[in-house]
């Protein structure tokens, strides 16, 4: 059970709160390489870097790609040099008549499965939005989870908290995905205490 957080000089506070919530590991996500060996913790600490294009970075546990537009996303996923993709539901494109502009379609679904890239749902995006925008994000995430159930690519959820009060218990986050339509077997797999 792992959570991803975006610290802003408050790493030790987030680490202590993750320990209280019962996480086994915590990924500190930055925009560039940072040294996390200076932080002490009872849980395993990992380093994640958010990139805007596909590139390998030495000494990083997870490379997280921030979605930009569908054409670039497809090329980056095809290269297979990333571990996670986030922000697919946060596109400026308008939704279509019969489906959502959620960033995932059958082609992207098959690529995610083939290249073993995981879709990472940003719970902080939902927590920080209100009204119509929140409902838009929820609908897009729900459609992405339908593709996940159909094509079998992996999905994870993370709080991306900047403050400790934004963090949530892991089982609550996974149950949120279940509420939006994630398959029961996938929920059970997410609740098993294994690493990514």
Image: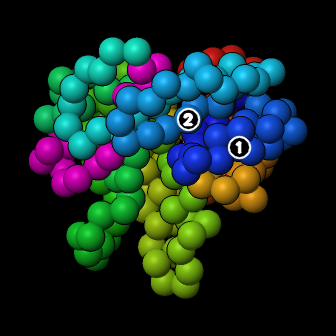
Q: Secondary structure at mark 1?
A: helix
Q: Is there any visible trace of residue 150 in the rendered image?
A: no
The residue carrying mark 1 is: 14
Range covered by the magenta-colored residues: 60-74
**Residues packed near mark 1 inside 10 Å, few (<14), some (14 to 19) or many (20 plus):** many
Where is 138 relative to 108, above or below? below
Instruction: Answer left or right for 60 relative to 10.
Output: left
Instruction: Answer left or right for 97 relative to 64.
Output: left
Residue 74 on image: x %, y %: 18, 39
The residue carrying mark 2 is: 28
Where is 8 relative to 190, above or below? below
Where is 96 relative to 179, above or below? below
Given residues 165 and 157, the one toward you in this image is 165
**Residues packed near mark 2 inside 10 Å, few (<14), some (14 to 19) or many (20 plus):** many
Q: Quadrant of residue 124?
A: bottom right
Residue 181 on image: x %, y %: 60, 52
Residue 110 on image: x %, y %: 29, 31
The residue under the point 55% across, 84% down is: 131
Instruction: Answer left or right for 7 relative to 192.
Output: left
Q: Earlier in the sequence, mark 2 or mark 1?
A: 1
Marking on residue 93: none
Q: Is there any visible trace of residue 167 in the rendered image?
A: yes
Residue 55 on image: x %, y %: 22, 26
Given residues 88 and 46, the one toward you in this image is 46
Q: CA distance from mark 2 to mark 1?
A: 9 Å
Task: List the single residue furthest toward the right.
Answer: 20
The residue under the point 49% across, 38% down is: 29
């Amino acid at each position: 059970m792992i959570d991803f957080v975006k610290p802003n000089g408050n790493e030790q506070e987030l680490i202590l709160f993750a320990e209280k919530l019962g996480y086994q590991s915590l990924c500190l996500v930055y925009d560039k390489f940072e040294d996390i060996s200076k932080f002490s913790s009872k849980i395993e600490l990992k380093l994640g870097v958010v990139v805007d294009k596909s590139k390998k970075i030495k000494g990083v546990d997870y490379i997280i790609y921030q979605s930009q537009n569908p054409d670039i996303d497809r090329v980056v996923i095809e290269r297979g040099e990333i571990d996670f993709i986030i922000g697919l539901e946060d596109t400026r494109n308008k939704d279509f008549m019969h489906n959502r502009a959620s960033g995932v379609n059958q082609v992207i679904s098959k690529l995610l499965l083939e290249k073993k890239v995981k879709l990472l749902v940003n719970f902080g995006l939902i927590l920080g939005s209100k009204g119509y925008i929140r409902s838009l994000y929820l609908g897009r995430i729900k459609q992405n989870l339908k593709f996940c159930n159909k094509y079998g690519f992996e999905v994870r959820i993370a709080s991306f908290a900047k403050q400790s009060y934004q963090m949530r218990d892991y089982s609550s986050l996974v149950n949120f995905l279940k509420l939006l339509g994630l398959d029961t077997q996938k929920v059970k797999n997410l609740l098993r205490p294994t690493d990514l």
